[in-house]
Image: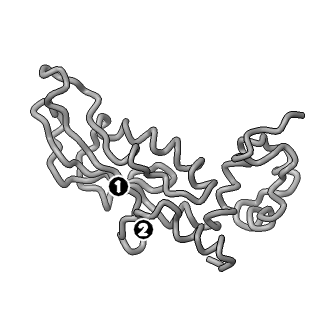
Amino acid sequence: MPKIDPFYVQQDDYLDDIQPNMERALGLTREDVMRMSPEARNLFSARRKLGNSWLDDYEVVVECTETGPDCTCGMQVGQQLVFDMRHKIVPEKSTAPLCVHMMSPVLSIFYMTFDRAAEGLNPFTCVWKFQECPVTGAGNGTGKSKTRAWLRDRKTGEEMTDRVLPAARAIAEGGAI
């Protein structure tokens, strides 16, 4: 069988090093893992780089930085939508109206989170930090609202700006998290 992309788990990688933790946390037996596709196993491989708690350690913040005249959602500068790493809105931390146009650009960020996390990397790069409303409006796009998105530590509220996340750095240095 041909090798798959080296940045992903290989055909014969059954996550033996993390399988006992997966069984304790998720009830996944070795047989369950062996039946998974390499792509599914790759999603779980993020635990190698970020430990078992990374989905609970971070949240995604999308903040309105500019409102355009074409905004019909009532968005105001400084309002935020906060998502957990399972892609759910955290209502008690969100201050912005639920605007599908503000949320839709964030979807591409969530597509990247697991891939980048599998490498221990912050899902936000300069490419993903800024979004704009997809509605062009009467001004042909000149009146769009804009947002900035970032990853923050759920417990401290601190913005995570490092390319390599602290948990991945600790594991790489041989420490436990």
Q: Quadrant of the N terminus?
A: top right
Vertical position of residue 112 compared to residue 23: above or below: above
Q: Is residue 6 above or below residue 152?
A: above
Please give the label number shown on residue 108.
none
Residue at 16% over, 44% down: 66
Q: Residue at x 29, y 29 (%)?
A: 134
Q: Would residue 175 appear left or right of 70 to someone viewing this image?
A: right
Please state which amino acid type lies under the numbered disc 2: Arg
- Image: 11 above or below 92: above
- Residue ranking furthest to the left: 69
For disc 2, the neighbor class at 10 Å (few under 14, some 14 to 19, many from 20) is some
Quadrant holding the C terminus: bottom right
Circle 1 sits on which residue?
61
Q: Secondary structure at mark 2?
A: loop
The image position of residue 157, as x and y in percent, is: 35, 70
* Amino acid beneath label 1: Val
| Residue drawn where x is 40% and y is 53% of the image | 83
Return the residue nearer the eye: 89 or 51.
51
Given residues 9 and 83, the one toward you in this image is 9
The quadrant in which residue 121 appears is bottom right
Query: Counting residues from the N terminus, which is met first, the one under dot 2 or under dot 1?
Result: 1
Pick out the residue farthest to the bottom: 175
Point out residue 94 in the picture as x, y percentages from the top left corner: 29, 56
* Residue 154: numbered disc: 2
